[in-house]
Amino acid sequence: MNYTSTRSDKKVRETYALLNGLAADGGLYVPASFPRRSITYKDIAGKSYQEIAAIVLSKFFTDFTEAELKDMINAAYNTKNFSTDDIAPLHSLLERVSILELFHGRTQAFKDLALSLFPYLLTAAKEKEGETKEVLILTATSGDTGKAALEGFKDVPGTHIQVFYPTDGVSPMQQEQMQKQTGDNVNVTAIRGNFDDAQQFLKRLFVNEEVNQAVADKGVMFSSANSINIGRLAPQVVYYVAAYEELVGQGAIHEDEAFNIVVPTGNFGNILAAYYAKMMGVPIGHLICASNRNNVLTEFFETGTYNCKRPFFTTLSPSMDIVESSNFERFLYYVCGENPVRIKAEMEGLKKSGKLSVTAEELSRIQREFTGAYVNDEETKAVIEQVYNSYGYVMDPHTAVAMGAYMKLLAKRPELGACHTVIAATAHPFKFPSALCEALDIREGGTPYESLEHISAVTGVAFPKQLAALQDTPIRFNRTIDKEEMRKEILAFVDAFTK
Ligand SMILES: *Cc1c(COP(=O)(O)O)cnc(C)c1O
């Protein structure tokens, strides 16, 4: 199948799009012909997560045989990588509200759903493209992506991965997860500075010809694992389709009855995947885009103007602390009728002025399907407490933002409550011990592990085995460098693995 950029109508092979991630014109790859209404309930009824994954992915990737896709899916979605057979179980919280638990993978974040499969897609694409160089994945992370990418790529033949994380900005638990990473093809380095510094540096490095040539001479090419790659987006569509199958199976909805989805949003990847599921035929009614105090998207869905000129806040839900949502460009592409000329102009305008607006007619069309709402940190903690006290269910701060946004909206628009609603739960609560202790009034321990012991004792939630095992794992990566040294760090890593 062919893909095209959101900013031009030049077509590329799907394997080229997978291998390169971002189009040369700066746009994002989208299917040249979207598989609209390609899935019905009959296609998926009674099927397992893996079987549904095979159906959904075959609509996006036609250059792989059925057997090739199945092999990749079985290698990614199994009980070695996930703590439950269901992969993404649907927990019924209230009669009309279910929680889609996306945190049962190796790093307890929803990123695992895509990053367990992505390394296989990437290496298979590389082979089909006839590319013989080794791939070095470069990632700057503010939290969950780095760890999920490390686990996804560790010991995958033909690949290496370098992760940079800022010294301030990741939670103690997230830092432990990365410093103690295992695998022979990984390197993790802390950067003095913030996430944007590291990210900006890598963006420049990707297009630096001199550096690219220097590593090419050693048989190495750079690639990235961030959420703009179509190989990360497509696997995320699967769990929304699987949730639909499950809702009908549980008797929560009829097969042609609409349900709503609430997604705690940062880069707009996860909610875009839900929109893709809708375009493919899943009867999704309203898509609710939940934000924290960084509420640029809430404002957009209210006013039709995306305004990046705003202060940046650090919050209890750090994976949503984003002002420029990269996957938003794909959404706009569909809003304006798949018009690359318009998108190119809009994105250039956004870069210049920090603002972008859709027409009143487009906004009213958007508002028929999308609604935004945001909650602040105090409200987030109150939701964690309220949901625990009322239903005995422990939510992480990101999921609590989604739940809080839904509750706020429901108060304003009670008609939304007529449909069943699915809340995407994007992280295991135990990744955020101090927020939980504060919200649930549980005594904090001297270490994150002690806090988690307290939380486990009070709430009865079991310690995920990977987090528990971390406690006795030695630290392996504790180097901290200045951002000016990033290039040297990468080249030294290349030297080490090409020796
Ligand atoms: C990455 C992340 C998000 C945001 O997802 P996007 O696809 O970037 O919108 C939300 N919650 C958690 C826990 C995350 O790790």
Image (cartoon, helix red, strand yellow):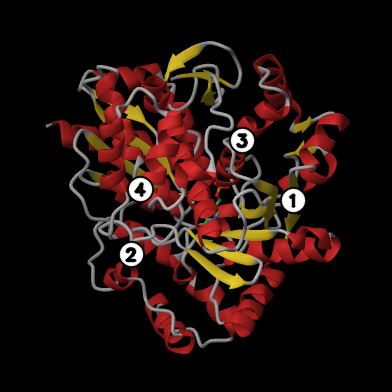
Q: Amino acid at mark 3?
A: Met
Residue furthest left as drawn: 499
First along the sequence among labels 3 and 2? 2
First along the sequence among labels 4 and 2? 4
Question: The residue tagged with tag 1: helix, strand or loop?
Answer: strand
Check if mark 3's residue and mark 4's residue have beta carbons within 8 Å: no
Q: Is residue 144 visible?
A: yes
Q: How many marks?
A: 4
Disc 4: which residue:
50
Q: Quadrant of the N terminus?
A: top left
Q: Amino acid at mark 4?
A: Gln
Disc 2: which residue:
83
Which residue is nearer to you in this view: 210 or 427? Answer: 427
Marks 3 and 1, how far apart at CA: 19 Å
First along the sequence among labels 4 and 1? 4
Give neighbour class at mark 3: few <14, some 14-19, many 20+ (Cα, 10 Å): some
Mark 2 lies within 8 Å of ligand 1 (Cβ measured)? no
Q: Amino acid at mark 1?
A: Gly
Q: Amino acid at mark 2?
A: Ser
The image's mark for residue 372 is: 1
Question: The residue tagged with tag 4: helix, strand or loop?
Answer: helix
Which residue is nearer to you in this view: 87 or 308? Answer: 87
In the rendered view, does 447 fall on the left or right side of 250? left
Marks 4 and 1, how far apart at CA: 32 Å
Mark 4 lies within 8 Å of ligand 1 (Cβ measured)? no
Give neighbour class at mark 2: few <14, some 14-19, many 20+ (Cα, 10 Å): some
The image's mark for residue 279 is: 3
- Give the image location of residue 294, x and y in percent: 69, 52
Marks 3 and 2, how far apart at CA: 30 Å
Q: Residue at x 38, y 17 (%)?
A: 209
